[in-house]
């Protein structure tokens, strides 16, 4: 049986290294998407969730390609994170050269940039609500290079191809996952949900 750290200790580590609310929300969003991906691919929800939660925990302190995710990976290993998690986290950054050879690693790569992009699409809606975000509008915004320019679109396209899923379906899947935690993630906006 794989021993993974408790979520509470992972959150403490995340908060120690990540002070920005937006990066913390991103971590929680990727965690939620990964928990739903675990259901889809018969993975361990807690393991996959922790992988999503911790994938960028070092980014605020170590944002350079020379440091992220390498420094974070060292810290996770020191804290007893299993190789299944640390390897998937290393693989989410294409420049590390670590192959994404598990469903969990492919899933993390497929939800990371897309989750951030869906957050950005949500924030520009008048309602600021994910409940009004549709795949069509996400795909339209993906074509606008100036919108959320820091999002690596090539990673989004490559990840969908690696996972072997339809782009529209995958976008809808991630939107639906984020809707479940909309209030916690700051994505509920100013509309009433029945």
Image (spheres, rainbow, N blue to C red):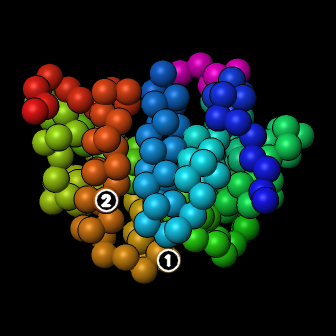
Residue 155 picture location, percent across and down: 48, 63
Marks 1 and 2: CB-CB under 8 Å? no
**Residue 99 included in the magenta stretch of the image:** no
Image-based side of 192 in relation to 113, left or right: left
Disc 2: which residue: 173
Q: Residue at x 16, y 53 (%)?
A: 134
Residue 17 picture location, percent across and down: 69, 25
Split into 4 quadrants, where in the image is the C terminus? Answer: top left
Q: Residue at x 28, y 51 (%)?
A: 176
Q: Can residue 52 be seen from the camera position used here?
A: no
Q: Residue at x 78, y 57 (%)?
A: 2
Disc 1: which residue: 162
Q: CA distance from mark 1 to mark 2?
A: 16 Å
Q: Secondary structure at mark 1?
A: helix
Q: Secondary structure at mark 2?
A: helix
Q: Can residue 49 be seen from the camera position used here?
A: yes
Which sits earlier in the primary sequence, circle 1 or circle 2?
1
- The residue lying toward the viewer, choosing from 89 and 7, is 7
Q: Which residues are magenta?
A: 14-20
Q: Quadrant of residue 171?
A: bottom left
**Residue 16 included in the magenta stretch of the image:** yes
Residue 69 picture location, percent across and down: 71, 47
Residue 82 picture location, percent across and down: 80, 53
Image-based side of 139 in relation to 35, left or right: left
Q: Residue at x 52, y 68 (%)?
A: 42
Looking at the image, residue 67 lies above or below residue 21: below
Looking at the image, residue 28 lies above or below residue 31: above
Judged from this view, the residue extending furthest toward the front is 1
């Amino acid at each position: 049986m794989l021993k993974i750290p408790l979520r509470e200790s992972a959150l403490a580590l995340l908060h120690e290294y990540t002070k920005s609310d937006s990066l913390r929300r991103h971590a929680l969003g990727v965690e939620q998407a990964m928990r739903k991906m675990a259901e889809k691919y018969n993975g361990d929800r807690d393991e996959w969730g922790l992988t999503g939660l911790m994938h960028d925990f070092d980014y605020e302190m170590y944002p350079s390609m020379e440091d992220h995710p390498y420094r974070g990976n060292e810290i996770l290993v020191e804290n007893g994170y299993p190789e299944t998690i640390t390897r998937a986290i290393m693989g989410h950054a294409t420049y590390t050269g670590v192959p994404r050879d598990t469903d969990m690693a492919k899933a993390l790569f497929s939800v990371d940039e897309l989750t951030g992009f869906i957050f950005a699409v949500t924030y520009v809606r008048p309602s600021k609500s994910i409940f009004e975000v549709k795949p069509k509008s996400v795909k339209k915004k993906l074509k606008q290079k100036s919108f959320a320019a820091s999002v690596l679109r090539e990673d989004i396209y490559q990840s969908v191809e690696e996972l072997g899923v339809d782009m529209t379906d995958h976008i809808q899947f991630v939107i639906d996952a984020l809707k479940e935690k909309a209030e916690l993630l700051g994505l509920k906006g100013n509309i009433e949900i029945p």
